[in-house]
Image: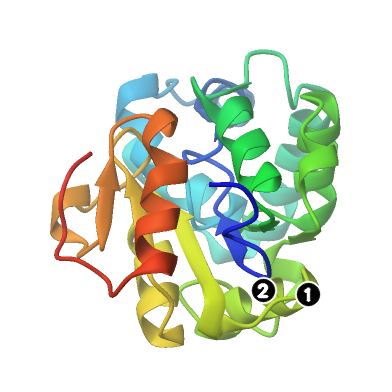
Amino acid sequence: MAADLAGAVIAFDLDGTLVDTAPDLVATLNVLLAQDGLAPRPLDEARPFIGRGAPWLIERGYRAAGAPHAPERASERLDRFLVHYLAHIADQSRPFPGVIAALEALKGAGARLSVCTNKRTGLSNALLDALALSCFFDSVVGADAAPAPKPDPRHLTTAILAAGGTPERAIMVGDAATDAGAARAAGVPLILVSFGYTETPVRDLGADILIDHFDALPDACHALLGACPAPSRTL
């Protein structure tokens, strides 16, 4: 596959796609809930709340804990969340199995890599630095660095352009409806992982290719960029 991805951009979601961040995100949510006298949420229950940014995670977490939505407290809760999360951003978070080998293979094939995430850019860079992943990426574009967050297609196109590519030769790799929506609206082929964070069953999101392990990613990218997109399938 040497150099056959030259000029292509592979854009990745971060939470639930590249990195299993749920343990640290949910732990931070539970710190907030405890401070407000509410019961913690189990990891499996709160995992699907991840993917639309911290404000959504906090709102969904408080609702699940039986607290009424309180827009007047949203800013204060977010500030508390961000302070704690940044201090514990990689306590338990780890790349999913096969991530590093897949990124190395894609770079070796000539691809440029981008992170396109609803996480804030500063937090994304802090996480990538902590896990020694920053060296792989030509751009990191959080929701705050785009005209609008995913599923708005401008988030994805901004990330692709920032990496030096074009949407005509790019792929979105994600795990949830926000990634699928952005890719479809931007006209970019879509690879989804089966092990991420999603409230909608991943098989209902219309991926061009669905993968169960990062070992399958390089071949999936080659298939989509080297030939006409194939019907959704599992590798």
The answer to whether 188 is drawn above or below residue 43 in the figure is below
- Residue lying at the far front of the rendered structure: 2
Amino acid type of the residue tagged 2 in the rendering: Ile
Where residue 178 sits in the image (x, y, percent)?
Answer: 41, 65
Amino acid type of the residue tagged 1 in the rendering: Gly
The local crowd at label 1, few if under 14, some if 14 to 19, many if 20 or more residues have their Cα within 10 Å, is some
The answer to whether 120 is drawn above or below residue 84 in the figure is below
Asked whether residue 20 appears in the rendered view, the answer is no
| Distance (Cα) linking label 2 and label 1 | 7 Å
Depth check, front residue: 102 or 34: 102
Residue linked to disc 2: 160
Residue sitting at x 59%, y 60%:
5
Depth check, front residue: 165 or 77: 165
The answer to whether 205 is drawn above or below residue 106 in the figure is below
The local crowd at label 2, few if under 14, some if 14 to 19, many if 20 or more residues have their Cα within 10 Å, is many
Depth check, front residue: 210 or 225: 225
Judged by depth in the image, the label closer to the viewer, 2 or 1, is 1
Q: Which picture quadrant has residue 131?
A: top right
**Residue contact at pointers 2 and 1, CB within 8 angstroms:** no
Asked whether residue 180 appears in the rendered view, the answer is yes
Where residue 188 sits in the image (x, y, percent)?
Answer: 43, 77
Where residue 20 sits in the image (x, y, percent)?
Answer: 52, 27
- Residue lying at the far top of the rendered structure: 92
Residue linked to disc 1: 164
Residue 24, which numbered label? none
In the image, is 189 to the left or to the right of 231?
Answer: right
